[in-house]
Image (cartoon, helix red, strand yellow):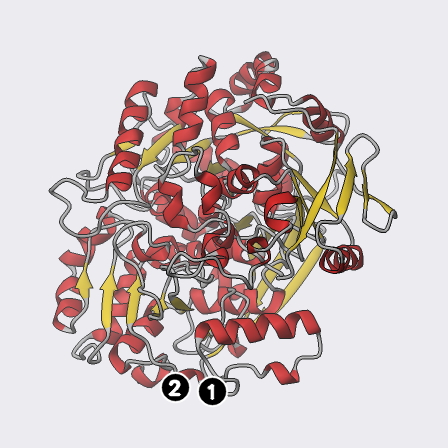
């Protein structure tokens, strides 16, 4: 009998085109997502070498990182941003790549639109020149970020030269308490395993609490696998996955759907499959989380306090904590709920889906954004924005004093005009609290959408459970 | 694209003491809008190296001589290059003049991207990296020798340390090979795989 295999093992073996003697593999790529920032040099490389793009039909391009989230009808003011978007538009024309333009309702963050269109499916290999490609693993595929050289390699060959990753399983058992969301799970996980805990591994998220998540929640969890060092995160496909996919524009139809379903059901890890690393958490013990420092691993329950470097014995860790506290302008022992914020950002490939907007609106409803706080809601795509407006969520949020924007990456990485000014502090639903990530000198606290809304209302980091009765 | 072959290098090292230096620190996102050019080196560690007013921050190692002019090998701490997939992090290091970075561990995507540019990331044990950085602080401008063929790093103290390197990566690195050419030689295998192994219902974005 064949030895039990993990979800990752199965997908890997199903995509092997060739294997070299030293174990280096050539793997086939089923879906290549392209955006304006990491693709120009790849297209240029193809041109310079006189190569074509092998499979435009397995490629989709969109502009998301640079796009403005207001005043989209006119010319983009920032020259470099405009040129980067125009360059993508020229490249997709020249190479025949399907493209959702800025005026297309399907436009949005690349990791939101792939699943939305049913392009992301179980068992696939999905890549993109973006580290948050891990998001797509929520469907039970192998999805990971690549650099621009690899983008060019996929364009030219529809394959990648890779070595197999190790298997890691993170199990979240049980039921979470009120107020705890997928974002709190992943912050708790990163806080536990550390920012390099998954390096060299693919993380399979499992357990009752993961199974109970919607696809949106699973995407939030997988999205931040890279923040734990893992190139890919994945969740085995199940009825929730199939339910989400069925009827989407690019999902298989009719007999093809049945054939696909039969195949997808063979994918979940076999009983007894071996993992190189195992982590287990109890959902019941996870309360809403925030980050206090400048690494996603600096995550604590909202009831906590800023750590005291004096209590840390490891010299390197102590120095890092001291530096983070200084950069973030905090005090050791300070209560997290005493940290005031200037900006609140709800959006990004981590938390820019309909469920996230609903969660923010549920907290904001009938309340007002605190004086002196600016709060932005940036839907992840046109197809998130439209139903949100149909549900009246935009009005609830506008009435509460939030700004309602057009889709894009926005303040997650400050490549458009949405950014923190030096010294400003945000509560943000994005994925990285690195120094300067949301603008030079800006300070970021990562939170769930509900926690972000609570921060907007109170003017400081707040425990969303106080709003849920 | 084809790279300059990398077989050996003896050059001054630069110690960078922080752990978890992410690629947003190596090159902030706002510089990703610019095509790679003669001035791309100025983006390297921009917000660590320069103060908000544009003056050099003397507290950052690369602001100081001889590291600034002579440094070609960066010696970092654990998890160097974590975070964003931006290959510009490798470009910025190269455009500054670096050819290699030594650290106890790396972000996976950065590690991969490095080889694609003929830039060598070397994993050495934490204690070895700590000692190398100390040597470079004690004797600024001290040299480190990298021998790719022998897979060794020799520190200023003359002690050689072995490092791991996949055969295929070594082959490409020492010859400056473009791996797209290598893969295109296997086009028939890719054709066969597409014909025989991909179900007809699978994801066509047409």
Q: Is B71 on the left or on the right of A356, as rendered? A: right
Percent of width and height locating residue A449: 33, 67
Q: Is residue A398 above or below residue A407?
A: below
Q: CA distance from mark 2 to mark 1?
A: 7 Å
Task: Depth check: give the residue in front, A117 or A49.
Answer: A49
Percent of width and height locating residue A405: 19, 56
Percent of width and height locating residue A374: 23, 70
Q: Please tell me in which quadrant of the rendered image residue A423 appears.
A: bottom left
Is there any visible trace of residue A465 in the rendered image? yes
Q: Is A377 on the left or on the right of A276, as rendered? A: left
Task: Depth check: give the residue in front, A431 or B172.
Answer: B172
The residue that label 2 is drawn on is A338
Q: Is residue A210 above or below residue A364?
A: above
Asked if disc 2 and disc 1 are in contact, CB closer than 8 Å, the reply is: yes
Is there any visible trace of residue B203 in the rendered image? no
Q: Residue at x 44, y 17 (%)?
A: A48
Query: In the image, which disc is placed on residue A86?
Result: none
Quick one: label 2, few (<14), some, or many (20+) residues within 10 Å? few
Instruction: Locate the C terminus of chain B by quadrant.
Output: top left
Q: Residue at x 48, y 27 (%)?
A: A152
Quick one: label 1, few (<14), some, or many (20+) residues within 10 Å? some
Task: Depth check: give the residue in front, B189 or A87.
Answer: A87
Percent of width and height locating residue A159: 54, 26
- Residue occupying the far right of the picture: B159
Q: SS of the residue at dot 1?
A: loop
Q: Residue at x 33, y 85 (%)?
A: A466
Chain at tag 1: A
The residue that label 1 is drawn on is A334
Q: Is B47 on the left or on the right of A393, as rendered? A: right
Task: Depth check: give the residue in front, A297 or A118.
Answer: A297
Q: SS of the residue at dot 2?
A: helix
Chain at tag 2: A
């Amino acid at each position: 009998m064949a030895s039990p295999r993990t979800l990752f093992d199965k997908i890997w073996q199903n995509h092997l085109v060739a294997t070299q003697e030293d174990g280096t593999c050539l793997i086939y790529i089923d879906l290549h997502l392209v955006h304006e920032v990491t693709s120009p040099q790849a297209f240029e490389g193809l041109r310079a070498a006189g190569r074509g793009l092998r499979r435009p039909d397995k490629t989709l391009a969109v502009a998301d990182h640079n796009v403005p989230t207001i005043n989209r009808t006119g010319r983009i003011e920032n020259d470099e941003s405009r040129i980067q978007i125009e360059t993508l538009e020229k490249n997709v024309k020249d190479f025949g790549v399907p493209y959702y333009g800025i005026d297309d309702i399907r436009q949005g963050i690349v990791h939101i639109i792939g699943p939305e269109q049913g392009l992301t499916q179980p068992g696939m290999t999905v890549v993109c020149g973006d580290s948050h490609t891990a998001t797509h693993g929520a469907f039970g595929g192998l999805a990971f970020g690549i650099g621009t050289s690899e983008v060019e390699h996929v364009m030219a060959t529809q394959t990648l030269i890779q070595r197999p990753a190790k298997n890691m399983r993170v199990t979240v058992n049980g039921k979470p308490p009120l107020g705890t969301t997928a974002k709190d799970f992943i912050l708790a996980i990163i806080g536990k395993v550390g920012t390099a805990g998954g390096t060299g591994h693919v993380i399979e998220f499992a357990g009752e609490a993961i199974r109970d998540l919607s696809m949106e929640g699973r995407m939030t969890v997988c999205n931040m696998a890279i923040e734990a060092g893992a190139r890919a995160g994945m969740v085995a496909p199940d009825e929730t996955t199939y339910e989400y996919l069925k009827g989407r524009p690019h999902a298989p139809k009719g007999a093809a759907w049945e054939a696909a379903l039969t195949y997808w059901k063979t994918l979940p890890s076999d009983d007894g499959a071996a993992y190189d690393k195992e982590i287990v958490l109890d959902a019941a013990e996870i309360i809403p989380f925030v980050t206090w420092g400048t690494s996603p691993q600096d995550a604590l329950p909202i009831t906590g306090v800023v750590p005291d470097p004096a209590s840390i014995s490891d010299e390197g860790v102590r120095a890092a904590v001291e530096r983070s506290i200084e950069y973030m302008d905090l005090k050791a022992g300070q209560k997290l709920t005493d940290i005031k914020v200037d900006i609140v950002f709800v959006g990004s490939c981590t938390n820019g889906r309909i469920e996230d907007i609903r969660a923010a609106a549920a907290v904001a409803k009938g309340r007002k954004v605190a004086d002196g706080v600016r709060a932005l809601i940036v839907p992840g795509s046109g197809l998130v924005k439209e139903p949100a407006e149909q549900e009246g969520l935009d009005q609830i949020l506008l009435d509460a004093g939030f700004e309602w924007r057009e889709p894009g990456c926005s303040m997650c990485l400050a490549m458009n005009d949405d950014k923190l000014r030096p010294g400003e502090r945000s509560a943000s639903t994005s994925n990285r609290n690195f120094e300067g990530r949301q603008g030079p000198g800006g300070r970021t606290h990562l939170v769930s959408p509900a926690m972000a809304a609570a921060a907007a209302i109170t003017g400081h980091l707040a425990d969303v459970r106080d709003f849920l009765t | 694209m084809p790279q300059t072959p990398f077989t050996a290098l003896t050059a001054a090292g630069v110690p960078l003491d922080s752990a978890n230096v992410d690629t947003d620190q190596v090159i902030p996102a706002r510089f990703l809008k610019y095509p790679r050019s003669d001035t791309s080196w100025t983006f390297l560690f921009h917000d660590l190296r320069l103060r908000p007013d544009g003056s050099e921050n003397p507290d950052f190692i690369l602001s100081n001589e001889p590291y600034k002019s002579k440094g070609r090998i960066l010696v970092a701490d654990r998890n160097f290059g974590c975070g964003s997939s931006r290959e510009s992090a490798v470009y910025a290091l190269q455009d500054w003049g670096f050819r290699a970075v030594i650290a106890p561990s790396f972000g996976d995507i950065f590690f991969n991207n490095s080889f694609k540019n003929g830039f060598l990331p070397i994993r050495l044990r934490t204690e070895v990296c700590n000692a190398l950085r100390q040597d470079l602080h004690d004797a600024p401008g001290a040299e480190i020798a990298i021998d790719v063929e022998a897979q060794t790093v020799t520190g200023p103290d003359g002690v050689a340390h072995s490092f791991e390197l996949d055969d295929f990566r070594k082959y490409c690195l020492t010859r400056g090979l473009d791996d797209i050419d290598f893969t295109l030689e296997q086009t028939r295998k890719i054709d066969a795989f597409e014909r025989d192994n991909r179900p007809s219902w699978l994801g066509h974005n047409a």
